[in-house]
Amino acid sequence: MPATLASKLRDDETVLTVWSGLPVPIMVELLARSGFDTVTLDMQHGQHDIASVRDGFASATLGGAHRVARIPVGDYATASRLLDLGAEAVIAPMINSAEDARAFVDAMKYPPLGARSWGPHRGAMLAGKTAPEYLRTANDETLAFAMIETPEAFAALDDILKVPGIDAVFVGPADLSLTLSNGAELAPEGEAVRKAAAEIAAKTRAAGKIAGKFCTSVEDIAWAQQAGFRLLNYGIDMSLFIEAVTQALRAAQSACES
């Protein structure tokens, strides 16, 4: 059986993901077929809903990519539904305390770690497992990523990392820059964010857990990998599409002028 997303990350492999905000299954499949290891479907700031995530997970699988999604703030019930639909990892924004982390874990993990309700029929199917096989591995192979993106979360990081069932953290550098500056600037690659992110990665790895980060440039990817982050996002479908079309149009216009 192919390696799981969880096993790759726990083996310290670097996994590249791309952000999907457009609720179009064929777009998810194309992102997967492009070679990204993972496609992350965004329900917080993207346009995805439960139906588009359901279809998007199937498209990601068809394209050969792992399945990840981000829930809206505090919508832990949706985390359970995403797992039932086949998510291999769920990213939860604005986890600012151990209490937030425990509520997230309750939705993500079966007893004794959490309180997730049984019903992963589609998830087991996409994983290629029977129901008993899925139950035996679910708590280890479905990853709970707590987003660290505020001074409160940064201050509570040690407590968040101690919560059983939190497998990983994910740095959101845009919100981290906004909250660290009290709304004064948006500087996801600024000095303050880099300093905080490096400490987050170091503490997370020391706790034996996985660190992920949204990267805003190729240079940021290199920095983040060196800092210890292993799930690295680069690119958003809408921006990538516009950039590719713009480059193609400019090339065509240049050919017409020559």
Image (tube, rainbow, N blue to C red):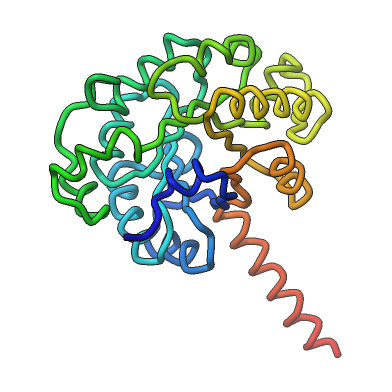
**Nearer the observer, 212 or 20:** 212
Residue 234, image x, y percentages: 63, 50
Residue at point 29% right, 20% down? 113
- Name the quarter where the N terminus is drawn: bottom left
Is 189 on the left or on the right of 146, as rendered? right
Question: Where on the picture, by quarter, is residue 134?
Answer: top left
Q: Quadrant of the C terminus?
A: bottom right
In this rendering, is residue 20 above or below 141? below
**Residue visible at 24% across and 26% down in the picture:** 110
Location of residue 161 with respect to 225 vertically, above or below: above
The residue sitting at 34% across, 35% down in the picture is 140
- What count of labels does the image hold? 0
Residue at the far right: name it: 258
In the picture, measured across the screen, residue 237 lies left or right of residue 42, that is right
88 left or right of 158 in image: left
Query: Picture coordinates of residue 184 (x, y %)?
Result: 78, 19
Front in this rendered view, residue 26 or 139: 139
Q: Residue at position x 53%, y 14% from top? A: 96
Where residue 155 appears, x then y in whole percent? 63, 10
Residue 54 screen position, x and y as percent: 28, 49
